Amino acid sequence: MKKLEEYVRSIPDFPEEGIIFRDVTSVLQDAEGLRLAIDTMQEKINDLSYDVVVGPESRGFIFGMPIAYNNRKPFVLIRKKGKLPCETVSMDYDLEYGKATIEMHKDSIQRGQKVLIVDDLIATGGTTEAMIRLIESLGGEVVGIVVLMELAGLEGRKRIADYRLEAAITYEGK
C-alpha cells in the first residue's frame, strides 16, 4: 500500500521559481489515494468532540463533506463573497497580493456549537484565521482544524497557535 505522500504530485517552480506546488488533484483522481486521505484526516480527529463540520470553498468542501457524512454531522459552507443566497456574515483577510472576503450564512452556526474546520491545506494561516474569526463571530467554538497538507515553512501553525491543528501530511518547506 502506498503512503499518502506518494499520491501528492509535486510540481517544481509553480507558480513561480523556487516554489514546489503540492497538487491535491492527484490524490482526488486515485480512488485509493482519496480514501487514504479521508481516512487519515478522520483518524487525526477521532478523539475530538464536535457538533458541525465547516469547510471552505472549494477543496474544504471535498474533504469536509465525507468527514461530516461519516460522522453524521451537518456540513456548513464557507464561500467567497457574493456566492451564498441568504443573509450572511463576512470576514475580510489579507492575501499575499491583496485582500479577500469569505462569507457564511448567518444561521449556519448556533451559539455554543463545537466546530471542526476541514480544509486541504494550511500555508500562512490567513484563510484559516479568517474562518476561525467568522465562526466565533456567530458564537461557535472552534475545537479543531484538520487539513490534508501543512506547508510548515510558511508558519501558519504559529498564526493559529491557540487552536488544535492536525495535518495528514506535513511538508517542512514552503
Image: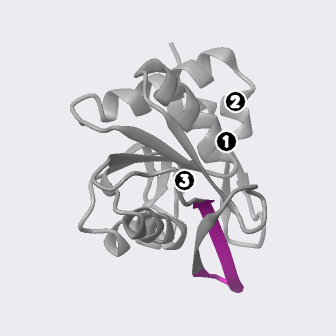
Q: Mark 1 touching mark 2, by CB under 8 A?
A: yes
Classed neighbour count for the residue bearing mark 1: other residues with Cα under 10 Å, few (<14), some (14–19), many (≥20) = some
Of the residues shown, which amino acid type is indicated by label 2?
Leu
Which residue in the structure is indicated by mark 3?
A: 121
Q: Residue at x 75, y 26 (%)?
A: 29
Left or right: where 76 falls relative to 40: right
| Prevalent SS, magenta region | strand
Q: Residue at x 78, y 66 (%)?
A: 82
Q: Relative to 36, is 101 above or below?
A: below
As for residue 97 lying within the magenta part, the answer is: yes
Q: Under tag 2, what secondary structure?
A: helix
- Nearer the observer, 42 or 19: 42
> What separation in Å lies between label 1 and label 2 (alpha carbons)?
7 Å
* Residue 3 visible in the shown view: no
In this picture, which residue range is highlighted in magenta? 93-104
**Circles 1, 3 touching at the beta carbon (< 8 Å):** yes
**Measured along the vertical axis of the image, is residue 59 above or below residue 81?**
above
Residue that label 2 marks: 28
- Distance from Cα at disc 1 to Cα at disc 3: 9 Å
Q: Residue at x 66, y 60 (%)?
A: 20
Residue type at mark 3 is Leu
Note whether 97 is above or below 18 in the view shown: below
Disc 1 target residue: 24
